[in-house]
Amino acid sequence: MPGNTFVYSTCLLMAVLCVAVLATHGLNEDAVRQTIRLTAATSFGLLICAFAARPLYQLNHSSLARSLLHQRRQIGISVAVSHSYHLLTIFLLNWVLFDGGMSFQQSLADLGPGIAVYVILYAMALTSNSFSQRLLGKNWKRLHRFGIYSLMIAFTAAYTGKAIESGGLYWLISSAGLAAFLLRVLAWQRQRTPQHSGDTVQN
Ligand code: HEM
């Protein structure tokens, strides 16, 4: 896929999905909450693809794994695009709840972890280019490794909490996150075996 096609397509598809939900159910609290849940799920789905791309390729050189690995940077930026819709719909919820005003129900202490995750997410998205990679040197890899693990932990923990609370589909979503971590462990173990120790793929 050429250039940023994947990112632009995500941007367009997310807009279409959110507008479709709001057009179907009306601009009310329930519908906006649906779009918030939808955007959280699309962000996590994309994040899992970006996180699993390398271990999947190390374990199995299939065409799907190769194409995921090839598109990984675009998929990563698309996580930021999708989660920007999460942010927009959160603002929309406040607008709906407070009748055009802006007031958050939670305290800054409650919002803190969510804001920190957004800071990490945008730091990663803004440095997802070759120029930043050259400029930051070894720190680029540190930032992106720390970032992707932080995001995966935050999402998996949030969905596991939801699964414990509400069960059903949330168990499936949370298991997908846990499976992605398992893939990383398996790929790491395989990497340590003497016959595969030379198969390195850059992060
Ligand atoms: C300060 C920033 C944030 C605010 C104010 C916020 C607010 C919300 C709200 C209002 C909901 C909908 C609850 C409902 O009606 O069911 C929600 C759902 C959710 N958010 Fe966020 N969020 C923030 C950041 C994040 C971040 C950074 C993540 C990523 C880890 C995240 C992941 C989720 C998940 C997984 C759900 C549950 C979706 C579901 O129930 O299906 N949020 N958020």
Image (tube, helix red, strand yellow):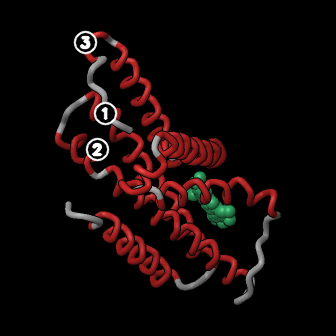
Residue at 44% in and 29% down: 182
Q: Secondary structure at mark 3?
A: helix
Q: Nearer the viewer, residue 28 or 117?
A: 117
Residue at 25% in and 12% down: 195
Q: Which residue is mark 2?
A: 69
**Kind of residue indicated by mark 3:** Gln
Tell me where residue 108 appears, x and y as whole percent.
Answer: 80, 63
Mark 1 surroundings: few (<14), some (14-19) or many (≥20) residues within 10 A: few
Residue at 68% in and 83% down: 95
Query: Rounded to the nearest whole Å, what is the CA distance between mark 2 and mark 3?
Result: 22 Å
The reply to whether callout 2 and callout 1 are in contact (CB within 8 Å) is yes
Q: Residue furthest front?
A: 135
Relative vertical location of residue 91 with respect to residue 86 in this rendering, above or below: below
Q: Residue furthest top?
A: 194
Q: Which residue is mark 1?
A: 201
Q: Considering the image in quadrants, where does the C terminus appear?
A: top left
Relative vertical location of residue 16 with respect to residue 6 in this rendering, above or below: below
Res 127 label: none
Q: Which residue is mark 3?
A: 195
Q: Secondary structure at mark 2?
A: helix
Q: Secondary structure at mark 1?
A: loop
Ligand 1 lies in quarter: bottom right
Q: Is residue 172 visible?
A: no
Q: Nearer the viewer, residue 66 or 93?
A: 66
Tell me where residue 160 appears, x and y as whole percent.
Answer: 59, 42
Query: Rounded to the nearest whole Å, what is the CA distance between mark 2 and mark 1?
Result: 10 Å
The CB of the residue at mark 3 lies under 8 Å from ligand 1: no
Residue at 43% in and 36% down: 180
Tell me where residue 88 appears, x and y as whole percent.
Answer: 57, 74
